[in-house]
Image (tube, rainbow, N blue to C red):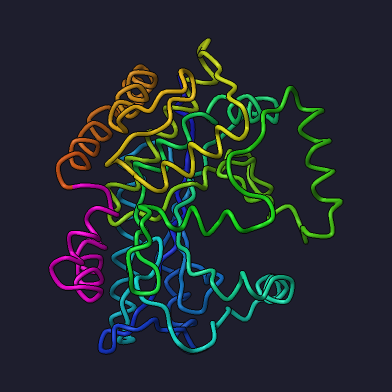
Amino acid sequence: MLKRTFGIEEEFFLFNEHTFRLAPLDTVQTSHLLALNALAKPGNVQTEFLAAQIEIATGVCTDSGQAMNELRGIRQLLAAACNELGIFPVALGTPVLLPNEPTQITAAKRYQTVQELVPGLASEHYLSGMHIHIGIPDLASGIRALNGLRHWIPVLVALSSNSPYWRGQDSGFTSWRTIQYRRWSINGIPPHFDNVETYLKHRELLLSSESLPDAGHIGWSARLSEKFPTLEFRASDVQLTSAEAVALAALMRALIDTVLDTAAELIEPAPELLQLALWQAARVGMQGNLLDLKSGSNTPAWEHVRRLLDFVRSALESNGDESLVYEAVERWAKTGTGAQQQRAAWDLGGAHAVLDGAQSTFIK
């Protein structure tokens, strides 16, 4: 049986190596980094919303080892190219420190349109995520996958949390990026759809609003891609290391496999409970209780992870990803998620220690 395809996109912040301040790219620096596309094959390097951001992506992968080699290889190319410019990339969901100067948006038509539409949101969009694309055969399968993964999104947000700091202080959340995203027009966990017809009608109603310039602004935590035959999981903060990123992608593929290829139980909680569970997961991460959407009780986050692993175990084994994912989960349990590692670094040396730590793990 052929393995389901997947791909990974990552967004990074760029910092000046001397001042430790965000470093917006000028035209020459941008050209220097985009020249990596001649080397990053498969995969690519692109500008992002902020001028002090860059995005990378793998090609279409079928094997986790392939994804690891591609992602780590592009990160290494990017780190070396940035070093030549006196800057360095970091994989943090929020940048610890924000500039005092006005926000610099990348000079692209789409981004400028967003800035004109919602300047207050655009000026604070200092957010970097990881998007995981999972191949789906058709629209009906994509809708079934969306319905089946909805109640798992909170635990995946907790496990991937890597953005506790904002404006030089602890936000009180492990994934402040998740909370910031909730301010946009369409966000959070997607609704349940009965069939393709109801999905398309819902999409049409959303796009008829004058608040959405295009379908790209339907920013659910998981959505069906407008560009590729994929389900796009968008809820994860960018990860400190390539190994963590690929482990999450493998876990997500196994989840979609299980939903689509088995008679998996479908849980349909009330919408407000789903959104509350997401908020709670963004706040406590893996160091507290998450809302059990089936029983209504509060259960330790690691119990939710155990249930998720039990749910996808067969798919992980079929894909050959069980060791990769189990080892990553063991590391998170031992050393903490990105958010926990950031807080530990902060306690030792503040913002500079967080950035030093993120820089040192970037190519791992």
> Image check: 17 left or right of 253?
left
- Please give the name of the residue rendered at 84% of the width and 54% of the height, measured from the top-left corner: 209
- Please give the name of the residue rendered at 45% of the width and 27% of the height, measured from the top-left corner: 255
Residue 247 at what x, y percent from top left?
32, 40
Quadrant in the rendering for residue 39? bottom left
Quadrant in the rendering for residue 185? bottom right
- Residue 254 vertical placement versus 19 (above, below): above
Pick out the residue farthest to the front. 297
Nearer to the camera, 352 or 27: 352
| Range covered by the magenta-colored residues | 336-364
- Residue 270 vertical placement versus 171 (above, below): above
Residue 154 at what x, y percent from top left?
45, 37
Nearer to the camera, 172 or 259: 172
Quadrant (top left/top right/bottom left/bottom right) for the C terminus: bottom left
> Image check: 271 left or right of 41?
right
Quadrant (top left/top right/bottom left/bottom right) for the N terminus: top left
Nearer to the camera, 7 or 52: 52
Q: Would you say residue 356 sits in the magenta stretch?
A: yes
Q: Would you say residue 174 sits in the magenta stretch?
A: no
Pick out the residue farthest to the right. 208
> Image check: 110 left or right of 319?
right
Residue 106 at what x, y percent from top left?
58, 78
